[in-house]
Amino acid sequence: APLPHRRKAMSAPPASKKQAPWKGFLSGSLGAMASGAVTHPIDLVKVRMQLYGSTLDGARHAGSAGVAPKAPPGMMRTGYLVVKHEGAFGLYKGLSASLMRQASFIGTKFGAYDLLKSAVPKDADGGLSFWKMTLCGLGAGAIGAAVGNPADLAMVRMQADGRLPKELRRNYRHGGEALARVVREEGVLALWRGCAPTVNRAMIVTASQMAVYDKSKAVILKESGAKDGLAVQTGASFIAGVVAALTSNPIDLAKSRLMTMKPDAEGRMPYSGTMDCIVKTARSEGVGALYKGLVPTAARQVPLNMVRFISVEAMKKLLADVD
């Protein structure tokens, strides 16, 4: 008798492999550390420019031991003054803390963004609308900032130290020592000084970076018909960097000033919070002062975004087959 016909099982197409959460955090951390190391000198110049004219040191500016000129120094002159008074390696002050910040803060926000996107209900076409991506960016920025604030505080203080008179400098040797001394001298909660503006800024920057990057990338792919690769990622990250720089600068300035402020002779801090710092800065230095450091901010944000997103995309590709 003929053998019964055995029906061949229909094999369903393989389901797309969901990325493990740790891959998002790791690829974000590694990509952020690479981009942070490249753009650190620009970030230091930006911080020095933002602190020029602050209550902390009156009219003193980056690296100068004398009286500040009437007009604040520009990006190139600020960088020149740093090199002149502190040497070329002065541009890399705070690098160890910066790498700590990239690994903790930026790695967390990349991982959190991926997690939030996977948790948000998808649209009918299987994707996410821009406002949903923006909400994911806001949430990821807040989470990353809360985790990374201690390293961020250490980095800003180390970058700003060289502009102070020698007797007022903290002289942290590296990021680890900075964190330990802050805890010992000011208490554990001091590690989260300036956390509010850090969170505010991170929410704005992350929403700008992530949502604008994803949206720009989708539009470029759709309109150009190009494949997802270096050219598309470069274009999308450039757009995201410009938007992030424009939206975040006033809060970034307040964050730098709050993190480096010291009490006066009577023990009073010059600023009580983010809005107080922004209002006092605008009142005493003019509204335009809120955009001090915008040129280096943009000069840093644009290449930083390009290197960071391209690095993160490369890391995700490398980790795609790792279990």
Image (tube, grey):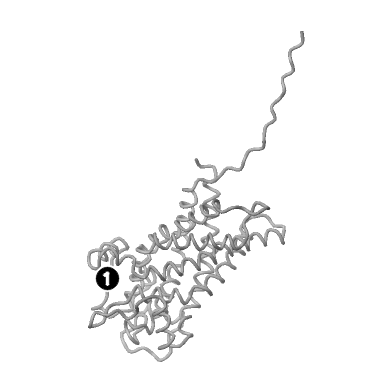
Image-based side of 26 in relation to 157, left or right: right
Residue, disc 1: 171
Q: Secondary structure at mark 1?
A: loop
| Residue 13 horizontal/vertical position (percent) | 67, 37
| Residue 72 horizontal/vertical position (percent) | 42, 86
Residue that lies at the very extreme toward the top in this rendered image: 1
Q: Nearer the viewer, residue 257 or 72?
A: 257
Residue that lies at the very extreme toward the right in this rendered image: 2
Residue that lies at the very extreme toward the bottom in this rendered image: 70
| Residue 35 horizontal/vertical position (percent) | 48, 62
| Residue 26 horizontal/vertical position (percent) | 46, 51
Q: Report the residue at 61% width, 53% height from top.
A: 122
Q: Nearer the viewer, residue 199 or 67?
A: 199
Task: Tell me if residue 140 comes above or below residue 323 in the rendering.
Answer: below
Q: Report the residue at 38% width, 66% height from top.
A: 152
Q: Quadrant of residue 52?
A: bottom left
Q: How many marks?
A: 1
Task: Tell me if residue 288 comes above or below residue 310 in the rendering.
Answer: below
**In what quadrant of the picture does the N terminus appear?**
top right
Q: Report the residue at 51% width, 42% height from top.
A: 322
Task: Tell me if residue 259 comes above or below residue 130 in the rendering.
Answer: below
Instruction: Decide: few, some or many residues near mark 1? Use Cα within 10 Å; few <14, some 14-19, many ≥20.
Output: some
Query: Which residue type does callout 1 highlight?
Result: Asn
Q: Nearer the viewer, residue 294 or 148?
A: 148
